[in-house]
Amino acid sequence: IGLGIVYREVGNSILSKRHYELAKKIGEDEKREDYVAISYNNLGNLYKQLGEYDKAIAFLQLALTSFEKFGEERFISDALEGMGEVYAEINNNQRAIDYFSQSISIAESLSDNYRLLSRYANIAKSYADSDDKEKALMYFSKTTELAQSIGDKSRLSEVLIMISDFYKMNNDTENALLNLKESLIISKEVGDTVSIASALNSLSEIYFQRKNYNEAYKNAFESYKISSQKNLMNTLAQSSFSISRILEIQGNFKDALYYYRIHKKTQHILLNTEKIR
């Protein structure tokens, strides 16, 4: 299980899946329900990262059912959060909020700050995406305070990206840029490639809105390189699209088409979600 997590973190989804499936088989052979359930949960999160949302939901539901069977509340909270993250990815914000709320209730009852940190961040983003500014800001504030108090730089970096997106949605590009640049500094300190790629895409978007196409291209291409190397499908789809439209504006139609095709190919993988909405 541990090796599966390590391989997922470094972007090797093939070896990650292989180790999770091996852990599941060992758990089944030894009749260890906890190993099987944790493996289901890990496979669900891996498929979520790869954009295969139907498989993600199937495995996370298996994990949730298994955790509820032997009553491990921490892991029930984890599976509920995973389900919320999948529904957030496919823009079903109300369903995401429902799952995040259930997960938060359990984590608060356990006084589990580590788990609360990610739950607060996720529900804040879903409220922001639902245009509920008051609740979004409330949970963003809770998240940053908790991240700073326990010294979790990786999560703080992710939250700063979310806060930046919130400001961008409300046309406050100055605060958006400030939060993004702070996030990028922290992400590079801790080597968090997912947050680095995400922050670079967001920086590219803001510079594009400001018609600073050179800075927009520079940040998008850096995100594209990281996303390609680490098999980060969401940020790869975003960066390839950004590069394509910048090159089109600059009159480089041949290369614009090349990156647009990469975007469409990646998007095809990510958007096969109609049957699970």
Image (cartoon, grey):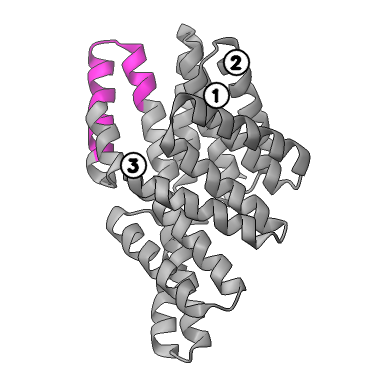
Q: Which mark is residue 116?
A: 1
**Which numbered disc, 3 or 1, marks the residue that appears first in the sequence?**
1
> Residue 35 appears at what percent x and percent y?
32, 17
Residue at image coords 23%, 37%: 18
- The earlier-in-sequence mark between 2 and 3 is 2
Marks 2 and 1: CB-CB under 8 Å?
yes
Q: Is residue 9 visible?
A: yes
The circle drawn on residue 42 is none
Question: Is residue 31 in the magenta section?
Answer: yes
Q: Is residue 234 visible?
A: no
Element carrying mark 3 = helix
Residue at the disc numbered 2: 108
Mark 2 nearby-residue class (10 Å; few <14, some 14–19, many ≥20) = few
Quadrant of residue 218 within the rendered picture: bottom left
Amino acid tagged 2: Glu
Instruction: Give the CA separation, mark 3 to mark 1.
Output: 21 Å
Q: Give the alpha-carbon distance from disc 2 to disc 1, as whole Å.
A: 7 Å
Residue located at (40% from left, 53% from top): 196
Identify the residue shown where x is 43% and y is 29%.
Answer: 151
The magenta span reads: 16-39
Pinpoint residue 10: horizontal percent, then vertical percent: 27, 44
Q: Nearer the viewer, residue 175 or 35?
A: 175
Q: Amino acid at mark 1?
A: Leu
Residue 182 horizontal/vertical position (percent): 48, 50
Work out whether 77 lies above or below 178: above
Q: Going by the image, does 145 lie left or right of 196? A: right
Residue placed under numbered mark 3 in the picture: 190
